[in-house]
Amino acid sequence: MSYISEILPPLLQGAVVSVELFVITLVLSLPLGLPFAFGEMSRFRPIRWICKVFVFVFRGTPLMLQLFFFYFFFPLVLNIDIPAFPAAVLTFVLNYAAYFAEIYRGGILSIDRGQYEAAHSLGLSKAQTTFGIIIPQAMRVVLPPVSNEAITLVKDTALASVISMSEMMRVSEGIVNRDYNLTAYVVAAAIYLFFTFILTLVLNHVEAHFSTYTRKEN
């Protein structure tokens, strides 16, 4: 126990960095995915293909490779030094925006075309139809996969250790290499499980609340 109390403070400091990366990524990528989803469905071909290529590239290449690319791209190509944390944020936001874009697109396409026709017959504009009718209904469809991606994000923050960012995985690895003791990995795993448990409870509550709200609306 004395050893755990000794290594816990630096692990918690690393956990704070992991949580910061998680929160910033989620706050920025959730809304960013929506314009890319609409872009993929755009009738304007250049916009549609740009969005499709973006989604294809970020979903089709490993997140670790993307981290390396952004971390080394700016110093080597643009001669701009970028710290590990901003590089990780940029990479994670773009990566998860691509995944959320596909989830949103699937949710929007799942809405029956009759909803559009009914809105049009009521004289609603395209924007009113999209944001007042389609997106609220699509939210019920996309919440479960969005929740799964959010839980995956908790674990993916560990990948930031590959660019020497001092998040929890990097800190635990340093402690293990220093002390030749695997306890730090066990404690780090317990902290990840705790975060995942709390997030799961919150997301389940959100899904239940939104489901109840949708039933009342219907």
Image (spheres, grey):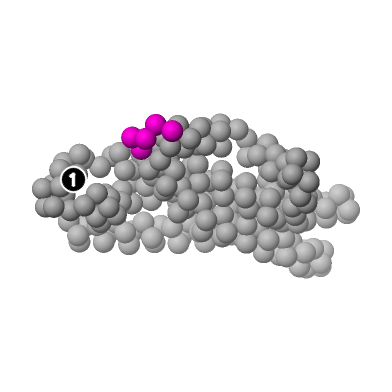
In the image, residue 16 lies at what x, y percent?
Answer: 67, 64
Residue toward you, 183 or 46? 46
Quadrant for the C terminus, please. Answer: bottom left
Judge whether residue 66 is colored magenta.
no
Magenta region, main secondary structure: loop
Extreme-left residue of the structure? 121
Residue under the image location 21 percent in, 40 percent down: 112
Report helix, strand or loop for mark 1. Answer: helix
For label 1, the crowd category at 10 Å Cα-Cα, with few meaning under 14, some 14 to 19 and many 20 or more, is some
Q: Nearer the viewer, residue 123 or 193?
A: 123
Left or right for 146, reference 193: left
> On the rendered structure, is 208 left or right of 181?
left
Q: What amino acid type should be assigned to the residue bearing mark 1?
A: Gln
Query: Circle 1 is placed at which residue position?
Result: 115
Please state if 94 lies on the left or on the right of 88 as rendered: left
Residue at the image position 32 percent from the left and 62 percent from the top: 209
Q: Is residue 72 above or below residue 88?
A: above
x, y (%) of residue 170? 76, 52
Q: Specify the quadrant that holds the N terminus.
A: bottom right
The part of the chain drawn in magenta is: 41-46
Residue 158 versus residue 49: which sits nearer the camera?
A: 49
Q: Nearer the viewer, residue 50 or 58?
A: 50
